[in-house]
Image (cartoon, rainbow, N blue to C red):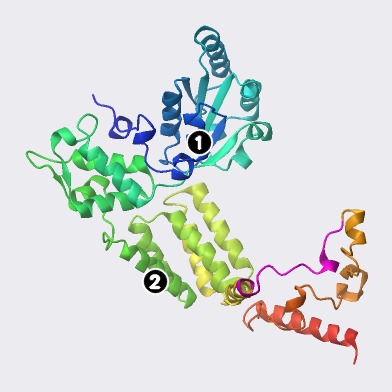
Amino acid sequence: MKPPLADRMRPRNLKEFVGQSHLLGPGALLRKAIEEDRLFSMIFWGPPGSGKTTLARVIAKETQAHFVSLSAVLAGVKELKGVVEEALSYRDTFRKRTILFVDEIHRFNKAQQDAFLPHVESGLITLIGATTENPSFEIIAPLISRCRVLVLYPYTREELRIILERALRDEERGFGAEGCEIEDEAADLIVWMADGDARMVLNSLEAAASLLEGKEKRITRILVEKALHKKPLLYDKAGEEHFNLISALHKSLRGSDPDAAIYWLTRMLMAGEDPLYIARRLVRFASEDVGLADPQALTVALSAMEAYRFLGSPEGELALVQAAVYLATAPKSNALYVANGRVRAVINETGPLPVPLYLRNAPTELMKEMGYAKGYLYPHDFEEALVDQPYLPEALQGGKVKFYLPTSRGYEQKIAERMANWEKEKEKKRGP
């Protein structure tokens, strides 16, 4: 029985590896370390199917190191001790370094991580950990400080297409010897539904190929839909409908139409769109089109995203619907979006204007002698914690520019009133 196509098509060396050029391109950090055999302990942080395990195996082969693989789900302290003994044996007998690859390293508890910490520090083990979670939250600080965190990105559609076509052509490990072909539309559908996951591309291709019958050797879009048990709604190979749907959702939210927002959101989910992509767009909308008219909107959108991560599909999708309805029915303001654009335009025009001396930090005596922080007025020393003191660079002072202009909608009405009252109080303090 053949191994799955995704296993058969694993790159065997750097030349075969596709993607992650920021790490493996000419002169890149990891590529130089491999070519010069100056490996360091590292943690690969990236989404599923981004090549973490494959890259670790390639590194081991390229450096001729002894490679040991552990799954954090199955291994315990006993298995780790066994790896240490094995590493000592290979070092003393064969003068070989040991690369320990730990998949899902974030699942190791503190005691397990502490167990191999001294061996990573001594250099007996070169650790390569793989995680889909933020290492800052899941891995102990002493271990992170001894490793470099390398981020792996989802594959682009172009890279996934290369991987797919290579599997079709490869006569030894892929479908090359069987003469399989694929329609462009079918290939684009597989790539689109994989959403950056190389493993999913190969699994989908294999599933579609398994449905070929008799002398038929051409994989069609219909065959792919049948294999994946999904029929994307109005999918087109250029991906235009993908952007049409998200545009319709965004504009329905902006137009305060909850029914239309639910409709377009559900259409996207049923078409196979990544729910987290939709969640990210909802978060963006909360700042761009609602802003401080309803400060709670951003919290609702972020909570919906976390709820989906916690529950997954289909249960978590209702949290996205809840957020969409909230955003659609919230008061709207793009004042933050406009303010951000104004600020960027001014900075591009004026360049990096100097910070006024009285706003500068003065941690040393020399800086104080130079006038740093001199004349700064501490607002809490004044009534209502309000002081008439400019905070922009000198070239922009005197009311020359206004970036944030709150609307009269929702909570921004209160912000506008507060800012107007502050200005009146400052004018009183200035006097005639």
Q: Secondary structure at mark 1?
A: helix
Count of labels in the image:
2
Query: Marks 1 and 2: in contact by CB < 8 Å?
Result: no
Q: Is residue 292 above or below residue 74?
A: below
Residue interval drawn in magenta? 347-362
Q: CA–CA distance between discs 2 and 1?
A: 42 Å
Q: Is residue 370 left or right of residue 391?
A: right
Q: Position of residue 111 (x, y in %)?
A: 65, 25
Disc 2: which residue: 248
Q: Nearer the viewer, residue 345 or 222?
A: 345
What type is the residue that disc 2 sits on?
Ala
Quarter occupied by residue 259: bottom left
Q: Quadrant of the C terminus?
A: bottom right
Residue at 62% of width from left, 75% of height from top? 349
- Say whether residue 350 is magenta: yes
Q: Position of residue 14 (x, y in %)?
A: 39, 33
Considering every residue shown, the one lying at the far top of the view is 93
Disc 1: which residue: 30
Residue at 68% of width from left, 32% of height from top? 142
Q: Is residue 403 left or right of residue 156?
A: right
